[in-house]
Image (tube, helix red, strand yellow):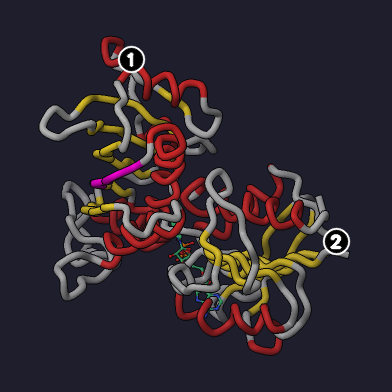
Amino acid sequence: MTKLAIAGATGLVGRKMLETVDRKNISFDELVLFSSARSAGEEIEFQGKTYTVKELTEEAASEHYDYVLMSAGGSTSAHFSPIFEQAGAIVIDNSSQWRMVDDIDLIVPEVNEPVLKRKIIANPNCSTIQSVVPLKVLQEAFGLERVAYTTYQAVSGSGVKGRQDLSEGANGKAPEAYPHPIYNNVLPHIDSFLENGYTKEEQKMIDETRKILKDEDLKVTATCVRVPVQDSHSVHMSVTLESESSVQAIQQLFDNDGRVVLIDNPEQNEYPLAINATGKDEIFVGRIRRDDSLDNTFHVWCTSDNLLKGAALNAVQVLEQVMSLKGVR
Ligand SMILES: NC(=O)c1ccc[n+]([C@@H]2O[C@H](COP(=O)([O-])OP(=O)(O)OC[C@H]3O[C@@H](n4cnc5c(N)ncnc54)[C@H](OP(=O)(O)O)[C@@H]3O)[C@@H](O)[C@H]2O)c1
């Protein structure tokens, strides 16, 4: 008897989680959907049944669940994930709350596997997830020395409010999710600023990349930018490799590796686009070029759906991974 809960089921990511659980045929006997008091009572149709969303309370989290997909923000996770864990659940959390805690696994199934010292597993930052997969492919083949990221992140990365700021900003409405209008604008600011001048989002990419790729000495830097795009993040990576490579060798490697999809025909104007990544599970890479200003360094352009591979899909893949480790699937 497998009991599954989704906390934050009424959010952008939570709804995608439900779709993905369905699409991936995740088997469960009982499903419970949680939100805050605000949406509790809402009805959600799923696999031919009507589910009434429940308010997430300490009492509800103390019941036994086998698996909990948690997508309700950092402070909610900080409070409720340990309660679910204590009651025996494996919690897969989408927030940044647990990612850099030593005993917590930070997992992208194409790259690493949980060891489950704790029963909370962290889903990495959305831009990090889509980036570490092609980086892992390069790391295995050539070794990595340095990565410099610049991101172009969609507003759905900020949940329902981010989408509203873009759509209503077109009518002149003042922004709520961002400090400046995102409509017709580009914001070099995601999450709050740290003392070193970087934003938390940039620091997350740096720290999480090292943890997932198991290379504490990897040189990583990041600039994270919000762009007026509804869905799907684009990331530019400048990657310095340890051993000699070439544009052709990297293209061939990506083309032959099932973990990424290469689109790199500039003469036909074919390269990865955010608009084409939306609604897809894959991570797209292209525009592979040598950076002649640095030794053995290459540019990689990468797009993926931030709500799918960047959030819900990765979480459900982690769920499949732990279910198969435990022999449930
Ligand atoms: N959007 C992305 O691309 C993305 C990517 C990676 C990670 N994430 C992370 O995923 C999480 C959810 O993001 P989102 O984009 O889906 O946000 P969202 O659309 O704003 O949804 C937030 C969800 O959390 C619920 N919630 C809020 N406070 C709660 C509480 N105290 N108890 C129980 N439920 C609560 C909300 O319920 P109500 O409906 O009742 O408010 C809603 O279901 C966040 O931690 C976010 O950082 C998002």
Q: Is residue 290 left or right of residue 304?
A: left
- Element type where label 2 sits in the image: loop
What residue is drawn where x is 16% and y is 70%? 196
From the viewer's side, name the closer residue of 228 and 312.
312
**Image coordinates for residue 110, horizontal then vertical, percent:** 56, 43
Residue 85 position by quadrant: bottom right
Residue 7, horizontal then vertical, whole percent: 61, 70
Magenta stretch: residue 148 in it? yes
Magenta region includes residue 303: no
Sort mark 2 into few (<14), some (14-19) or many (20+) by Cα contacts within 10 Å. few
Q: For residue 294, which numbered disc appears in the image?
A: none
In the image, farthest residue toward the bottom: 59
Quarter where residue 301 is shown: top left
Cα separation between marks 2 and 1: 47 Å
Q: Please, what is the three-letter code of the amino acid marked with disc 1?
A: Asn
Q: Residue furthest front?
A: 243
**Residue 42 seen in the figure:** no
Segment colored magenta:
144-150
| 248, 183: nearer the viewer | 248
* Vertical comparison of 292 with 102: above or below: above
Location of residue 157 with respect to 30 vertically, above or below: above
Q: Which residue is mark 1?
A: 265
Q: Amino acid at mark 2?
A: Asp
In the rendered structure, which disc, 2 or 1, sits on the residue that comes first in sequence? Answer: 2
Q: Which residue is denoted by mark 2 in the rendering?
A: 29
Q: In terms of secondary structure, where does tag 1 sit?
A: loop
Front tag of 2 and 1: 1
Task: State the residue lying farthest toward the top.
Answer: 267
Residue at x 18%, y 33% (from the top left corner)? 295
Q: Can see residue 200?
A: yes
